[in-house]
Image (cartoon, rainbow, N blue to C red):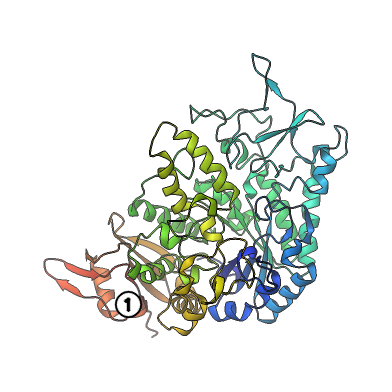
Amino acid sequence: MPQKAWWKEAAVYQIYPASVCDLNGDGIGDIPGILSKLDYLESLGVDVVWLCPVYESPQVDMGYDISDYRAIHAPYGTVQDVDQLIAALHKRGMKLVMDLVVNHTSDQHAWFKESRSSLDNPKRDWYIWRKPRWDAEGNRQPPNNWASVFGGSAWSFDEETGEYYLHLFCKEQPDLNWENPDVAQAVHDVMTFWLDKGVDGFRMDVINFISKTPGLPDAPVTIPDQQFQPAELHYADGPRLHEFLRGLRGILDKYNAFAVGEMPGVKEEAEVLKSVAEDRKELNMIFQFDIICLDNGRNNKFFPKEWSLPKLKAIVHKWQTCMFDNSGWNALFLENHDQSRSVSRFTPHRPENRNAAAKMLATFMGMQAGTLFVYQGQELGMANLPKDWGIDEYKDVETQNLYRLALEQHRGDPDGAEKVMDQVRLKARDHGRSPMQWNTQKHGGFTTGTPWMRVNEDYLHCNAEQQQRDPSSVFAYWQRLLRLRKQHADTFVYGSFELLAADDPAVVCYRRVHASAGAATVVLNFTDGEYAWEAPPGVVKAWEGARRILANYAEPGEIRKHSAAVVCLRPFEAVVLLEERKMC
């Protein structure tokens, strides 16, 4: 049985600061705006606020390009505003987690300005510099064939010093050289600065990229018609990663703080457990990407890939059982600032079934074992941007770069542009970054000015003010779900996981079991239509006799008994059935 801890039972609410609430009318969300919404978050029932980067930044990648770790981006507010936010959350019994982005900085950071100033500057090897290669025709080439995550080469040439620097993301985001112990110490100092202020932990951005393969060799050619190749093999989970993570953990443990790491490209259980198993003393949990990469094509995310419900269930079963059996811990999420809206992406639906679909997805994720992460607007069932919006409405640097790359790879296909745009409409990061929809006022109540990004037009019928008044809303459903997780934490947080009906193409069904607290059965219809499900006998028994503690339809569904019992599930129906242990 897992050991208990506050962060295991917590519900974490992620805030994307530019889009949450603009209090001063400049069109950009700000920290005072967040402060004005703390009563809303408290009423939802979340325990922790995770704040995406608010540090000083040129905003090339919306704050993930940091130019000063100890200062705040002026449109968001001041360090004093963060102090006030920490105090206000702690007064409510809530906690604050900040983003820690230390694989790379901005090219405007003082460290990089010094590093690029000369070959012999003391901070030269705080970043990763290499001499050029030359091809047979005498043309200058990057040091290796690594592709940037955002497309193109992962290297940019610096004319002043005649060398290339590595950037796994934008050219304005140079990678730090963690092989230099001064870099690790500088990061530890940044963490200490914020922990001393009362921050309760960190979400660590692409933290498994901080150790690279020595020598930075070429990546294998996996996309033959592309000059630069995906190179996760050489920069994800490098040879010194766990040494570096233990160094970070040493700082966190002094403050009883916690850390969740973002770790793209990690799929093997053994590798994940090296980072999250309790006895390893590294991270408390990680975000791994199996579910949110289900529909990403081979070349990049804007290529399609079919996925099936049995595949999704296999992923859930893999990680639920792995963590339970090996003293690890899961981070549960379907949305964040890098993903589109789950109700649009994973549950294609008729408009009248949108709320049912959003509630079903909440149940699917919320009844699993792990720390639950809710992204702003997910508690309302916010959807993707309208399909008639053109590419010019999409602001994200990743969207624009990968869109251009995908168009190039579709050359010669007369329908190529529309195929790419279909994937942008489904999976672009912009969908999760559109401003929060607070009410029916202009711009959804997000700002009195001109919003930095256009507000989704459906705010008139999907907004927080309306949903807070409606006991049948998606918001009210999330409130009930979060209360139930706390009331029955032994079962829903710490209980074991058993997957049923693994091969069924339409239904997800699983059981959560705790030896003394009882068991629960979760039944979910992932389709937009009615589904006659031949349920296992144990599920039928629970359906008829257990307590129905959460459901997105008011009345229980019908059971028809012929040669086998058939449970008649309505579109996107979700039911949680609790079988409590009887005390002698």
Secondary element at image label 1 = loop
Kindly identify the residue that appears in the image at 58 percent across and 53 percent down.
395
Q: Is 342 left or right of 563, judged from the image as shown?
A: right
- In this figure, which residue is indicated by the disc labeled 1? 553
Residue 83 location, x and y as percent?
A: 77, 72
The total number of labels drawn is 1
Indicate the quadrant where residue 298 lies.
top left
> Is 175 situated above or below 508?
above
* Position above or below: 468 against 431: below
Kindly tell me whether residue 336 is visible in this rendering. Answer: no
Q: Position of residue 364 (x, y in %)?
A: 41, 65
Looking at the image, residue 5 sits to the left or right of residue 122; the answer is left
Specify the farthest residue to the top: 136
Please name whichever residue, 293 or 37, is drawn nearer the observer in this view of the structure.
37
Give the farthest residue toward the left.
563
User: Are there few (<14), some (14-19), or many (20+) residues within 10 Å of tag 1?
Assistant: some
Image coords of residue 310 (percent x, y): 33, 53
Comparing 33 with 277, the one in front is 33
Q: Is residue 165 above or below residue 90?
A: above
Image quarter hosting the C terminus: bottom left
- For the question of whether residue 538 can be seen, the reply is yes
Query: Which is more toward the observer, 388 or 91?
Result: 388
**What amino acid type should be assigned to the residue bearing mark 1?**
Tyr
> Which picture quadrant has residue 445?
bottom right
Q: Reply above or below: 538 against 68.
A: below
- 427 on left or right of 499: right
Q: Position of residue 471 (x, y in %)?
A: 42, 83
Residue in view at x 48 percent, y 57 percent: 325
- The residue shown at (34%, 79%) is 548
